[in-house]
Amino acid sequence: MTSSPRPPASRADRPAPLYLTWNDIGAATQALAKQVTVGGVPQAVVGIVRGGMIPAVWLAHCLKIRDVRTVEVTHTAEDGINAAKTPLPTVRNPASLGDLTGLDVLLVDDIAGSGATLAHTADLLRDLGPARLRTAVIAVNRANWARKDEPERAIDYLASLHDTWLVFPWEEQHEH
């Protein structure tokens, strides 16, 4: 795929959000586990708090990995559909990652919107010396993607691509 990055659409132009179910997440997690296994099972899984923790734990169970770690990195200023972004991702408690030296690590988040949170967190983890670092997300919101490279090139494993905001089953869901 060789298309150029899409400029963010205005709020009025954005399609309605897509509400994912637990079954959607289960299917996506299974798809990610199959993709990851082809490249070899990692030694540790790191979930980006908050949204990435559920898929990280689920993937760890699928892959039979007991070493699950967390780091809090946020790029949205608040919860909610099409929430405003902070200028840069904010990291809290990076010491929670512990020693990753020499490990094969899988970094997991629920969604990549602009791609900034995942890229920033991957850089943080690389500084901790893993032998290998791979990334995985349940979904990409291409409507917000802001990186030069396409999601399929920037993320090692992704389950789905969408052009709208996604609401996960662990988030507040309103009638739709």
Image (cartoon, helix red, strand yellow):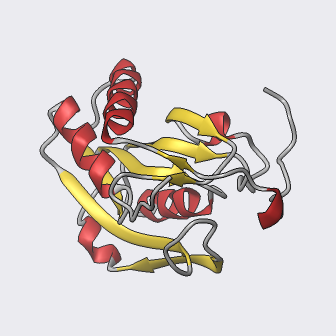
Residue 38's x, y, as percent? Answer: 38, 18
| Residue at (47% x, 43% y) in the render | 137
Q: Is residue 155 visible?
A: yes
Q: Is residue 108 above or below residue 25?
A: below
Residue 118's x, y, as percent? Answer: 53, 57
Pick the front one: 125 or 172: 172
* Left or right position of 137 against 46: right
Residue 93's x, y, as percent? Answer: 32, 80
* Left or right position of 47 against 58: right
* Left or right position of 82 against 3: left
Q: Is residue 54 above or below residue 76?
A: above
Pick the front one: 97 or 90: 90
User: Which of the 4 image quadrants contains residue 35?
Assistant: top left
Numbered disc total: 0
Q: Is residue 24 above or below residue 103?
A: above
| Residue at (46% x, 65% y) in the render | 124
Image quadrant in which the N terminus is located? top right
Looking at the image, which residue sits at the far front?
A: 175
| Residue at (63% x, 42% y) in the render | 154
Pick the front one: 134 or 166: 166
| Residue at (55% x, 63% y) in the render | 117
Residue 73's x, y, as percent? Answer: 44, 71
Q: Is residue 102 visible?
A: no
User: Which of the 4 image quadrants contains residue 175?
Assistant: bottom left
